[in-house]
Amino acid sequence: MAPFAKSAIIVLVSMAFCGVSMGVVHQVGDLAGWTIVTPIDYQKWAASKTFRVGDVLVFRYRNLFHNVLRVTHHNFNSCNTSFPNTVYSSGSDYIKLRRPGHFFFICGLPGHCRSGQKVHIEVLSPSGGVDHRRKPLSVSPNNSKVAPPPFIIMELPAAPTRAPTSSATTLMFNYVGVGDDSGWHPMFNYRKWAASKRFFVGDTIRFEYNAIFHNVLEVTKRNYRACNAAARPIGKYYSGNDTFVLTRPGHRYFLCSFPNHCRNGQRVEIYVHKVSRPRQTPPTPIPTPAAPGSISLPPLPSAMSPAGAPTGARARSSSSLLEPSYIHIIGLSFLALAFFV
């Protein structure tokens, strides 16, 4: 065992002298990941880190809405996605930094890079020194004033439900993403999904998808059942993030017109219920606090104060019932004075 222990010590000492160390794993964007939903300044994030040779970058994202392109410095500044050096699209990409220098990563989906989904990584040598032979690079900021593209294929968070306000007549409207986290694509049971929901007038539904491969057509019941996308639709949408406000009760029918998508399940029937407005309950009266030093009397018995009695003759008759008590009190007072005198 002694020779083995000496060998291990020699190897460890050699690794220390040679600068060999375990690399650090950096998740790009930390907990937020690689996205444009959360406003993240990836340049500021990168400036707060130190990257060395041997470290690992991790890009985590929803590959339905994002990817990772390693590009040149020029294409990074201009957000040019045409000629990337490397393309990653797994949704969980591990990229090992094997040499010092500058590395540039962007998202290749339309509009994402100009919306800030780009990061510049400067990798130092394992010893930690800066390579002064390299000239500092001018990197365009994320908020460059370049006209955005006509549409953006973007990822949206789970839609929140509006909370009711204090008014009793205020209605709650839901904001529902079709398919929930699965989005809009074939091979999904949208009939079962719709049956698990209740839609009301005023609610909003959202179709979220990759506009390169899908679209949304609102059609008639007949064309919905036949998966007929050739007939003239009620409406056609292809932004990748289409929202519909349900303004009337009844059935609405949607499908994708790409070949065989409808027959593979990419269609949904939405039944909209009428809104039943809640009754407005009167506010509970707040009792007025009594003045300091005053005595609060209990309410009169029902026999003396009948419910709904008017303030006319009955009120006077009720007060007359109290008059003899005062007379008795005065008489007893005189008798007590006469006794003690």
Image (tube, rainbow, N blue to C red):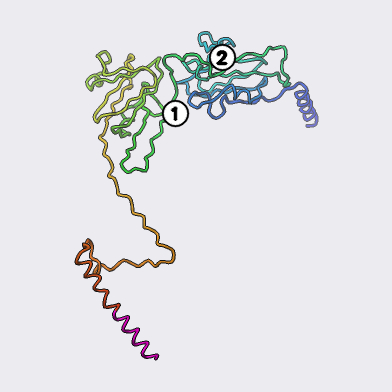
- Residue type at numbered disc 2: Arg
Q: Which residues are magenta?
A: 327-341
Residue 266: which numbered mark, if any? none
Residue at the spot of label 2: 70
Which secondary structure type mostly characterizes the magenta part of the structure?
Answer: helix
Callout 1 crowding tier (Cα within 10 Å): few <14, some 14–19, many ≥20: few
Kindly indicate the quadrant of the structure image that contains residue 46. top right
Comes first in the chain, label 1 or label 2:
2
The image shows residue 106 at horizontal and vertical percentages of 54, 16
The image shows residue 112 at horizontal and vertical percentages of 49, 18
Using the image, determine if residue 174 lies above or below residue 257.
Answer: below
Q: Is residue 119 left or right of residue 272?
A: right
Say what secondary structure mark 2 lies in: strand
Using the image, determine if residue 263 lies above or below residue 275.
Answer: above
Say what secondary structure mark 1 lies in: loop
- Residue type at numbered disc 1: Pro
Q: Nearer the viewer, mark 1 or mark 2?
A: 1
Residue 157: which numbered mark, if any? 1
